[in-house]
Amino acid sequence: MQPFTLDDGVVHLATPTLGDVDAITAACQDPDVAAWTVVPSPYTRDDAVGFVRDYVTPGWERGSVLTWAVRESAGRSGLPGPEDAGPLLGMFGLGLDDAPAGQRSAEIGYWMTPAGRGRGLATAAGRLVVDAAFDPEVLGLARLSWEAYVGNWPSRRLAWRLGFRVEGTVRGHALQRGVRRDAWLATLLADDPREPCEPWPHPVSADRVAG
């Protein structure tokens, strides 16, 4: 599959390249990224090179894992063109299954840097990815899934905003650096409303909103 970009005038999503290695390395020093993802910890520049070279590029070539770096769009920042979009502020990805066309599902994943949080950028990026996932002219998926370790309220709040329905908590579901962790699981179907489908379950005052 050929990589494609997504842009709504607020955020610009494009495939991360080796030119992003230093920014990815810096982003993955953030304790929250390490706490809630499976990135290596400690995270080195070699890890970032391997991520781009051995994960991102082959994933697009096979059409199995689609990864985008999140930046503010050029239009928002006043820069002249999409190629001049701002610095890397996060990462979004879709891991697709191998079901027949029209029945495919993907798991959505994401993280944002401290500079990208609390500004609505993750919500904008998530909407772009969800719309592309379900658009018959783009990916034409039937279903999206989301999961997060129990306690990752910022990730859950973004999924909630996008319309995901939490199906439950599964004990010991996810493996993080050799340790089993409980996880929340949620789904979004192609014809579901892309807005909250249930009341927010966690006090906002105690929530570190990702954006």
Image (cartoon, grey):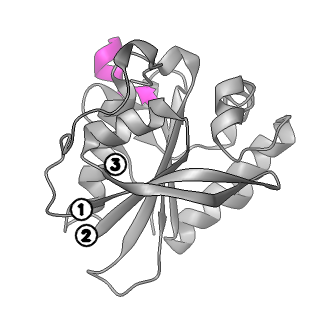
Numbered badge on residue 98: none
Q: Earlier in the sequence, mark 1 or mark 3?
A: 3
Numbered badge on residue 134: 1
Viewer-side residue, 168 vs 101:
168
Helix, strand or loop under label 3: helix
Residue at the image position 30 percent from the left and 67 percent from the top: 143
Under mark 3, the amino acid is Val
How many angstroms separate mark 1 from mark 2 (CA)? 5 Å
> How crowded is the residue under tag 1: few (<14 C-alpha within 10 Å), some, or many (20+)?
many
Residue at the image position 53 percent from the left and 22 percent from the top: 87
Residue 132 horizontal/vertical position (percent) = 28, 55
Corner quadrant of residue 42: top right
Viewer-side residue, 38 vs 94:
38
Q: Where is 205 relative to 177, above or below?
A: above
Corner quadrant of residue 43: top right
Q: Earlier in the sequence, mark 3 or mark 2?
A: 3
Q: Is residue 198 left or right of residue 34?
A: left
Q: Are marks 1 and 2 in contact (CB under 8 Å)?
A: yes
